[in-house]
Amino acid sequence: MEEKRKIVEGLFELSEGLSEAGYLVGSRCKKCQTVSYPKRVICPNCLEDREIEVTRLSQVGRLYSYSINRMAPEGFTAPYITGRVDLPEHVRIFSVITGCEPDEDALQIGMEMALVFEPLRQDAAGNDLYSYKFKPLKNG
Ligand SMILES: [Zn+2]
């Protein structure tokens, strides 16, 4: 099985199976329990730099805000949705939103969103590059 290619290293881990099986990689300060994403070497809350551990973030959060983008950068197709999702660890993740139509009726602030991993764009050789995205949980 060919390995899935990540769009960037260090932010998440992929599973070769289900698109839902990967996870975001954050860091947790063992002193004050602050979680950071992306992972950090120094705690942004208490400045601890020795007691930092890598942690898997939750795979379900709540939609904090979103916008429908009518203009697309190279490699994207407009319209598409981006948003911010709050996770139980008190981190806010900026993400492409998938699994719904790009119109205002498809999303509500505060709704549950589930983490998925899908191709975001292709590299110069035409290989899919995978990234994390969030989709409405109730849409299945
Ligand atoms: Zn800390």
Image (cartoon, rainbow, N blue to C red):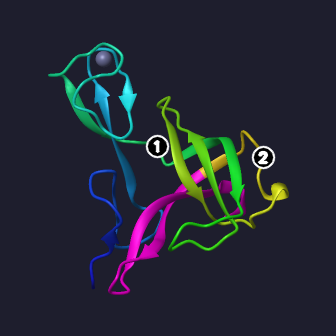
User: Which quadrant holds residue 16?
Assistant: bottom left
The residue depicted at 39 percent of the width and 38 percent of the height is 37
- Element on which disc 1 rests: loop
Quarter in which the C terminus is drawn: bottom right
Q: Quick check: is 70 in the magenta stretch?
A: no
Quarter in which the N terminus is drawn: bottom left
Q: Is residue 88 above or below residue 50?
A: below
Q: Position of residue 22 (x, y in %)?
A: 39, 59
Q: Where is ligand 1, by quadrant?
A: top left
- Element on which disc 2 rests: loop
Name the front one of labels 2 and 1: 2
Disc number placed over residue 58 in the picture, else none:
1
**Marks 2 and 1 close (CB-CB < 8 Å):** no
Q: Position of residue 124 (x, y in %)?
A: 34, 82
The crowding category of the residue bearing disc 1, from other C-alpha atoms within 10 Å (few below 14, some 14 to 19, many at least 20), is some
Provide the major secondary structure of the magenta segment: strand
Which residues are the magenta region?
114-140
Q: Which residue is mark 2?
A: 108
Tell me the amino acid under the disc marked 1.
Answer: Ser
- Report the side of 128 relative to 92 (left or right): left
- Distance, label 2 to label 1, CA atoms, is 20 Å
Q: Is residue 90 above or below residue 107?
A: above
Q: Which of the two residues, 71 or 55, is positioned nearer the viewer here?
A: 71
Tell me the amino acid under the disc marked 2.
Answer: Gln
